[in-house]
Image (cartoon, rainbow, N blue to C red):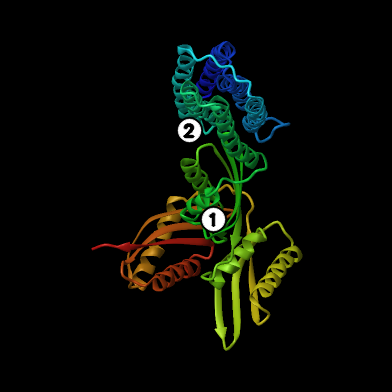
Amino acid sequence: MEQKKKNVALSSVFASLLLTLLKLAVGLITGSIGILSEAAHSGLDLVAASITYWAVRVSHKPADQIHPYGHGKFENISALAETFLLFLTCGWIIYEALKRLTTGKVEIEIAWYSFAVMIISIIIDYSRSRSLNKIAKESNSQALEADALHFSSDIYSSLVVIAGLVFVILGVKGADAFAAIGVALFVLFISYKLGRRTIDVLVDTAPKGLTEKVKDIVLKTEGVVQIDRIRLRPSGPSYFIDMIIGISRKIPLETMNKITKNIETNVQKEIQGADVVVHIKPLTLKDETIVEQIQIMAVNQSLSVHDVSVQTIDDKKFVSFDLEVNSKLSLEKAHKEADSLEKIIKRELGENIEVNAHIEPLEPVTISGAPLSDLQMQLILKILDEIKREIKSINNIHDVSGREVKKKLFITLHCELDKKIPLEDAHNVSTRIEYLMKEKLPNVERTIVHAEPGYP
């Protein structure tokens, strides 16, 4: 695409040069100010096309320390320069036309080549405007779009000049000068529209409707609760978009990252050249339970809690949980962490709450263990067989494994229960197994029970 832009811009330079020389020669020979005004217009197109070619080459340079947002706005600067030159040329054309109308000195020679040069101009202008417009749309280039606008405006102004020459042949006095004024006014109108758009880009005015389009795309992305802010600034063919979105604070960090990636992908699919930056604002939603709020508060303090229990008596709440703390800490430091978390919970949930934390040591590193001996496994399987007979709701116990760490046993097993049993009852069975294993084999440190539905 970069090479296409360079090629079409360079071909426009040569086309403008050819038209300028042809119109200038015919205008000087015939004395037609309409054709001379067109020559000036084409001369301006030559300057504009040269600026566009330079801007297209520079705008594709990658971002650097001096230009962290890239070089895209060089295209917009070139469009502004083209607009300024257009205004100057139009002023000169109107001045010369009015001078001829007031002095009455009109010496025009009408020849076949007067019409021929204008028809050739229309054909070349039509071809160039189509090519430029095509690449401008594909690359979202304002510089090429401005160049295309120049060539397309030349088509209409050439038609005005031809009409003026026809009226001269018919004997209408001053028709050529009026044609020149018509060309100038038309070009001024086109220049004004182009200049306004260019200035809008240079002062970071967001294109009309684009912010709303981005909002619609973002709100349709799964996981997004609200949009706090969207800022959009165009730069050449690119759009730099940054936003702050609200996401439930319950969502894991990896999922948050996935949501931001989805937003970037969805916006870039719809808006060509979009560079998207997403900032996340965690939100407390109304559907958060007290247990979830406590778990989030713990995570925010780099702590971990489990077995959170909440009871309500009258208007007072009683909260208890197991707090995992680095086993290398002293009791004093561990208690400070627990006390700090309890204060945060009371501040967030209200003072009419009683909080009790059970501190559990958490090993910060992986501990080496050893597999159980055959004798140990036989004993464990025997105990589990006894537990199965004692708890009637157990269908089967399988995939039993274990390891020994610092003379303590860690056991894992799968326990099949009725698939329609309530989850709370299944949890109670798991807890009962853990308790009985500890009771029957005191050196068991922990038993992990994986409850699963049994099938007939």
As helix, strand or loop, the secondary structure at mark 1 comes to: loop
Q: In the displayed orientation, state which residue is furthest to the right.
A: 332
Q: In the displayed orientation, state which residue is furthest to the bottom.
A: 314
Nearer to us: label 2 or label 1:
2
Residue in front for this viewpoint, 366 or 183: 183
Q: Which mark is residue 252?
A: 1
Name which residue lies at 53% across and 27% down: 175
- Would residue 379 be visible to someone looking at this image? no
- Relative placement, left or right, of 373 versus 89 is left
Return the x and y of residue 368 as percentages of the image width and height. Answer: 58, 47
- Relative placement, left or right, of 15 versus 75 is left
Above-or-below relation of 64 to 33: below
Q: Which mark is residue 339?
A: none
> Can you say which quadrant of the picture contains the C terminus?
bottom left
As helix, strand or loop, the secondary structure at mark 2 comes to: helix
Quarter of the rendering containing residue 281: bottom right
Badge 2 crowding class, 10 Å Cα cut-off, few under 14, some 14 to 19, many 20 or more, is: some
Quarter of the rendering containing residue 198: top right
Q: Which mark is residue 137?
A: 2
